[in-house]
């Protein structure tokens, strides 16, 4: 099985090489200036480069379960170096925090909040523990059982709002714009699998104000479950 998968990986890389134009990477050999850093869940169903149709040099990618923007440094949580680096060193001007419907990390954290059940793997447990205060706040302050969307998907969006707030509270963000999105493939926001929905822009969650930031063609891509 592993040899077949190894061959599959190399075949897929061959397809990648064939898809590149002859000069696709020539402008980026000596450095990078990606306009966007995307922080997304590392779920296999959610491709960061794919959702944004990103060419080489366009997207600085950060992935982890639960699309978290923090890292522990000397026992304190602060903005992850993977997010801070492009903001401080490559002139990146936009942060896109992307959650996704059906997020397993948020679901596991919801279980922990409800009945104290944590994943047994230490690394996964640590990630869930980091999300736990956010999920607990969401359950207390934001989630409604009367909303058609599932509690988990409401918490996915709430987590995006919290991660956006963390980025905006960091000195590294400077004058960069910070947008929050949810990638939908469960029909929670609309009927287009793979569509990203804008739920936050620089801390703004008001739908009318968010729609004012996009053109008419994308007005239906602004929504909320909260």
Image (cartoon, helix red, strand yellow):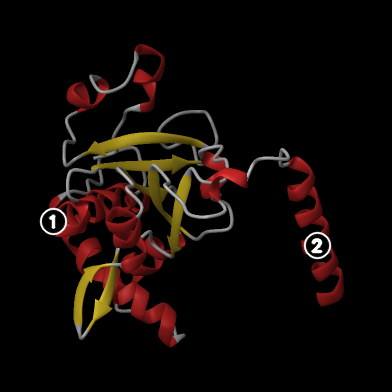
The residue to which callout 2 is attached is: 10
The residue to which callout 1 is attached is: 169
- Secondary structure under tag 2 reads helix
**Dot 1, how many residues are within 10 Å of its Cα: few (below 14), some (14-19), or many (20+)?**
few
Front in this rendered view, residue 224 or 20:
20
Q: Can you say which quadrant of the picture contains the C terminus?
A: top left
In the figure, 7 relative to 169: above or below? below
- Residue at point 23%, 19% (across, down): 212
Q: Say whether marks 1 and 2 touch (CB < 8 Å).
A: no
**Dot 2, how many residues are within 10 Å of its Cα: few (below 14), some (14-19), or many (20+)?**
few
Q: Residue 146 location, x and y as percent?
A: 25, 40
Q: Is residue 199 left or right of residue 53?
A: left
Q: Is residue 1 visible?
A: no
Q: Quadrant of residue 44?
A: bottom right
- Residue at point 64%, 41% (across, down): 24
Front in this rendered view, residue 209 or 26:
26
């Amino acid at each position: 099985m592993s040899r077949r998968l190894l061959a599959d990986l190399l075949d897929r890389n061959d397809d990648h090489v064939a898809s590149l134009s002859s000069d696709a990477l020539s402008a980026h050999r000596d450095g990078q200036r990606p306009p966007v850093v995307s922080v997304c869940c590392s779920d296999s169903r959610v491709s960061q480069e794919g959702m944004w149709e990103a060419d080489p040099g366009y997207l600085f990618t950060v992935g982890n379960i639960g699309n978290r923007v923090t890292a522990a440094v000397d026992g304190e949580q602060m903005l992850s170096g993977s997010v801070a680096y492009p903001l401080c060193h490559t002139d990146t001007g936009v942060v896109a925090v992307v959650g996704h419907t059906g997020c397993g990390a948020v679901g596991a954290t919801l279980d922990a909040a409800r009945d104290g059940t944590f994943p047994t793997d230490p690394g996964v447990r640590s990630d869930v523990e980091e999300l736990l205060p956010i999920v607990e706040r969401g359950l207390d302050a934001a989630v409604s059982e009367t909303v058609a969307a599932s509690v988990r998907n409401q918490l996915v969006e709430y987590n995006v709002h919290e991660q956006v707030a963390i980025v905006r509270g960091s000195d590294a963000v400077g004058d960069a714009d910070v947008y929050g999105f949810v990638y939908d493939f469960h029909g929670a926001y609309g009927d287009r699998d793979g569509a990203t929905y804008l739920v936050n822009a620089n801390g703004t969650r008001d739908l009318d104000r968010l729609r004012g930031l996009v053109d008419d063609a994308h007005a239906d891509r602004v929504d909320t479950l909260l």
